[in-house]
Image (cartoon, helix red, strand yellow):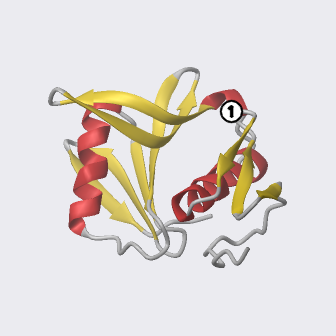
Amino acid sequence: MQVPKLNFEDTFDFKIRSDKDKFFIYDLVRKTWLLLTPEEWVRQHWVHYFHFIKGRNLSSLILEKKILLNGTTKRIDLLVTEKTQPKILVECKAPEIKLTQQTFEQSARYNSVTGAEEIILSNGVQHIWAKFDDNHYKFEPFNY
């Protein structure tokens, strides 16, 4: 399977297997094999980044958590917690999805429920980092 090269400083050792014509990637957090979609490829890079590079315990990483937003059930991609408190909301898009103001606003709406201090919006090639401070988001370059 040909997967796109993503914009991460480190390369990670992923477990990938195939079954018939489908490919699967092992999720360290949920301890299960998941269909390897472009979005999952990006999400698993972030899981590995936070665990292996930033030293976060796997128990501090919450994946695909359902939230209720304006009466509708939504799903967040990754929430990084610290002592059970939300710290970083990571919204993952497939590499071919362009990151726009609209995609950031989606993340900000999700964050109105989670209350994380920071948001990372990523398609694996481009990463946007924002910190919520004084009732607005401050955008800065993402530093590894």
Quadrant assignment for the N terminus: bottom right
Q: Name the one closer to the observer, 131 or 38.
A: 38
Q: Position of residue 119 (x, y in %)?
A: 40, 50
Q: Name the one closer to the observer, 54 or 102.
A: 102
- Decide: is 85 above or below 77: above
Q: Judge from the rendering whether residue 29 lies leftward or rightward of residue 102; answer left or right.
A: right
Q: Position of residue 71 (x, y in %)?
A: 16, 26
Q: Position of residue 68 (x, y in %)?
A: 27, 26
Please rate how many residues cluster around mark 1, counting C-alpha atoms within 10 Å: few if below 14, some from 14 to 19, many from 20: few
- In the figure, residue 5 lies in which quadrant? bottom right
- Decide: is 61 above or below 92: above
Number of dots carrying numbers: 1
Q: Name the one closer to the observer, 103 or 31.
A: 31
- Residue farthest to the left? 70
Dot 1 amino acid type: Arg
Q: Name the one closer to the observer, 111 or 67.
A: 67
Find disc 1 in the rendering and name its residue: 30
- In the figure, residue 109 lies in which quadrant? top left
Q: Position of residue 52 (x, y in %)?
A: 78, 49
Q: Judge from the rendering whether residue 80 lies leftward or rightward of residue 58; answer left or right.
A: left
- Seen at 84% across and 60% down, the residue is 13
Q: Secondary structure at mark 1?
A: loop
- Seen at 40% across and 29% down, the residue is 66
Quadrant assignment for the C terminus: bottom right
- Residue farthest to the top? 84
Q: Judge from the rendering whether residue 73 lies leftward or rightward of residue 46; answer left or right.
A: left
- In the figure, residue 2 lies in which quadrant? bottom right
- Residue farthest to the front? 20
Q: Judge from the rendering whether residue 140 lies leftward or rightward of residue 39; answer left or right.
A: left
- Decide: is 45 above or below 5: above
